[in-house]
Image (cartoon, helix red, strand yellow):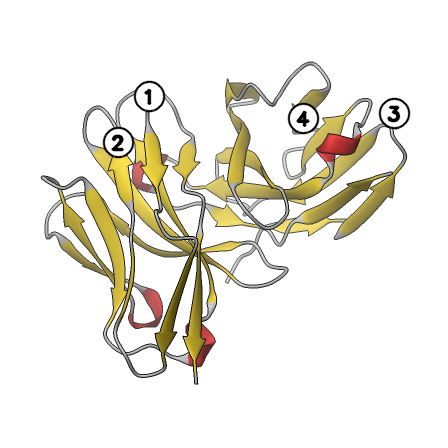
Amino acid sequence: AQSVAQPEDQVNVAEGNPLTVKCTYSVSGNPYLFWYVQYPNRGLQFLLKYITGDNLVKGSYGFEAEFNKSQTSFHLKKPSALVSDSALYFCAVRMHGSGTYKYIFGTGTRLKVLA
Amino acid sequence: EPEVTQTPSHQVTQMGQEVILHCVPISNHLYFYWYRQILGQKVEFLVSFYNNEISEKSEIFDDQFSVERPDGSNFTLKIRSTKLEDSAMYFCASSEAGGYNSPLHFGNGTRLTVT
């Protein structure tokens, strides 16, 4: 069965420090991978996606993610965290070519950037 | 930038009552979805809809749930007889045509409270 795992419920990082939010996936075939961010009382907002090509993907607000096929991971990174990055982050996978159009989301990681 | 619009933002209903949640997807999008989120945690897939029919549904989406696109712009989720455990944040989302790699665009959600 397809699944996405976010092993950390919460990540704390000091402002200005690099941040990493972890995601691993388990799918058959080639996955399409996504990161979304959710601010309080809002819907999820798209940050970035990996489809094919370069393993390092750049997205909105200075975020990037590294696709690692051998480790089945797609960790979200940012070189220098801002307090305004504090939010709930979701990794998601969408199956390619299987006939299904649904996304499978991870359980979410709450990022707290401390001033 | 076009948005997915959901109404109402908050709906309170008594157990056993019917509720209809409303969504207006982005106008040129062809794939529509409902997700729910309980207590600000995991985002759960309910149903996907394309070409005026359900393309996939989860085990959560039982006979009490139905979706409709009545007029070419609205996309509704109906819960026939609400239960306490239906209390959640319900998100509508849409994506463009040819959408295996198309990100979802989410509305801000409807908070459903069943008393």
Residue A98 is at least partly visible in this image: yes
Residue B69: which disc? none
> What's the CA distance linking mark 4 and mark 2?
33 Å
Residue B16: mark:
3
Q: Which amino acid does label 4 sit on?
A: Glu
Residue B12 drawn above or below residue B66: below
- CB atoms of marks 3 and 4 within 8 Å: no
Q: Is residue B42 left or right of residue A3?
A: right
Query: Label 2 to label 3, Cα distance in Å?
Result: 39 Å
The answer to whether marks 1 and 3 sit on the same chain is no
Q: Residue A1 carries which label?
A: 1
Q: Report the Cα–Cα distance between label 3 and label 4.
A: 21 Å
Disc 4 marks which residue?
A: B68
Q: Which mark is first along the chain, 2 or 1?
A: 1
Say left or right for B107 vs A78.
right
Which label sits on residue A26? 2
Most foreground residue, B24 or A44: A44
Rendered view: B109 above or below A65: above
Name the image quarter holding the N terminus of chain A. top left
